[in-house]
Amino acid sequence: MAATTRHGRWLVTAGAAPLMILGGRRASHAGAGASLKREYDAVVIGAGHNGLVAAAYLQKGGLKTAVLERRHIVGGAAVTEEIIPGFRFSRASYLLSLLRPQIYSELDLKRHGLKVLPRDPYSFTPLLEDGQGGKFPRSLLLGNSMADTQNQIAQFSVKDAQAFPKYEEFMSRLVSAIDPLLDTCPVDMAVFSQGSLLQKLGALKGLQALLRAGFVLGKDLPQYYQILTSPISKILDFWFESEPLKATLATDAVIGAMAGPHTPGSGYVLLHHVMGELEGRQGAWGYVTGGMGALSQALASAATMLGAEIFTEKAVAQILLSSNGKAQGVCLQDGTEVKSHLVLSNASPQLTFLELTPQEQLPLEFVQRISQFDTRSSVTKINVAVDRLPVFLAAPNTSDGSPSPHHQCSIHLNCEDMHILHWAFEDACQGRPSTRPMIELCIPSALDPTLAPPGCHVVSLFTQYTPYKLAGGKQWNKCERDDYADRVFDCVEAYAPGFKASVIGRDVLTPPDLERIFGLPGGNIFHGAMSLDQLYFARPVPSYSSYRSPIQGLYLCGSGAHPGGGVMGAVGRNAARMALEDFKDL
């Protein structure tokens, strides 16, 4: 239970309606004042960030576009919600880095109010150990200064400190090679068996991006191939010897994934998380001023300024098809039909094709593959309101209680050893929430004090591993949620005594909660596993990786398509460009 403080006790039931949204007022849909018409050129299902990006580009391309959102607020998982009075949380997604730079510039998001606060330092890993000679327990602080970072690493291994710049350079080269693939449509392999000669020649052009990546990597291609296919433990063991450094780096390879450090292919997930940039700095992550909902509001503002119309509380019940099997609009849950030439779905592949699309119109093999799309999740997100900053044994606070550099970081707890990460994963494989979970703790109010009352803070606890289905047929009920949250708080307390006493309230979101509230299938933050068998040519299924579907005029523009999850916007942008190209031929 949340601790009793001078602010009172707040324990939020997952799925409860937030009291206020953004700036203390209920957010109206973007484009307020417009009424829903009965016909558009294009309809986008879902106002998640990819849906908003797709709508902006469709409208920019000349198509009259409407976005229909099930919830009362735009943004999907990128939302700011005031769950506890006075505290505004990035309730699901909580950091920004991966958003494509083209989207920043082409949609002029700064003009629409987007402001990102870079973090330096960016990673803090305290250790649970007794201080020696009156010193504090050790910790590992990583930042943009390579010299300072090397000094930190040298506490544990001088060899690792010397190797770290080489490792960063090695990874940076791979990022540079793969980065252009994020903004291109995967080669449509179906064209080679079904298309005309002209279409086949066009598809061959799509291989250019892959060939360029190969040329960039050159003779080192086999080493980079190993990174994409190996367990992250194998990669990090090659470069480093100190466990705190390896475990800290490994968190980016398993975060959001039902995978452990020894799972083959986890190396790619690490790469996925270092492919972003902020203010020109590769791999940097930051907080959005006003929370992640401010990003969604900026995207919505850009789309509506271009002429798109966005409607909240408009749940789609079915995708409408014409007599010849082409998409021709959607039917809402209230029975309203909205006709359109194109339909782009920001929903997950399973929801789009197994629930919204008439099954008899889809190939059986396609339905089977979508049904088998891996959406296993490991994440429970806990949002916490506290009346003071955590005080870590490894880095005591300043006398005035103001934020220290480590408070702005991603703070990794239970991450001083890769064995701990592996054991946490093993628990979940048996259907049990981890007894010592991996925790990424962030305090965005350390850089953005507008998120909490004076002296108070919002804390984000991104935790793993918690299976969607519990062993023994148990359900994620209130008791199970509270037991797990209490366990997480006990872990934080071990590193930062007094944390539990500072808690004003909390919001616990298990995988089923993330699925129900935000439409994340299985609670998977990427809409589906980012494993090699579900990437590029095969996302969401082989032969349908070009955003098109078996239904003419129906496109996938959510994270279940290439290049996958994260607040990236690439899927929305790529899908819109593909749909616009096809629209010319209608």
Image (cartoon, rainbow, N blue to C red):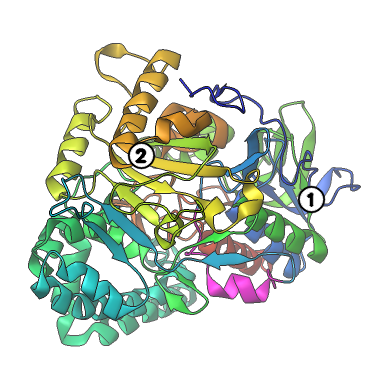
Q: Residue at x 40, y 74 (%)?
A: 179
Q: Is residue 338 left or right of residue 294?
A: right
From the viewer's perspective, is residue 62 above or below residue 407? below
Quadrant location of the C terminus in the rendered image: bottom right
Using the rendered view, name the quadrant where residue 357 is placed: top right
Q: Is residue 526 left or right of residue 529?
A: right
Q: Secondary structure at mark 2?
A: strand
The residue mark sitting in front, 1 or 2, is 2
Tag 2: Cα neighbours inside 10 Å, few (<14), some, or many (≥20)?
many
Query: Which amino acid, by three-letter code, is at mark 1?
Result: Ala
Q: Which residues are magenta?
A: 95-110
Q: Secondary structure at mark 1?
A: loop
Position of residue 322 measured from the top left corner of the image (x, y, whole percent): 68, 41
The answer, for residue 303, to whether it is visible in the render is yes
Quadrant location of the N terminus in the rendered image: top left
Position of residue 531 measured from the top left corner of the image (x, y, whole percent): 28, 52
Front-lying residue, 461 or 252: 461
From the viewer's perspective, is residue 384 above or below residue 294? above
Using the rendered view, name the quadrant where residue 281 is placed: bottom left
- In this figure, which residue is indicated by the disc labeled 2? 463
- In this figure, which residue is indicated by the disc labeled 1? 30
Q: CA distance from mark 1 to mark 2?
A: 33 Å
Position of residue 462 measured from the top left corner of the image (x, y, whole percent): 40, 42
Q: Is residue 254 left or right of residue 242?
A: right
Tag 1: Cα neighbours inside 10 Å, few (<14), some, or many (≥20)?
many
Q: Residue at x 36, y 66 (%)?
A: 274
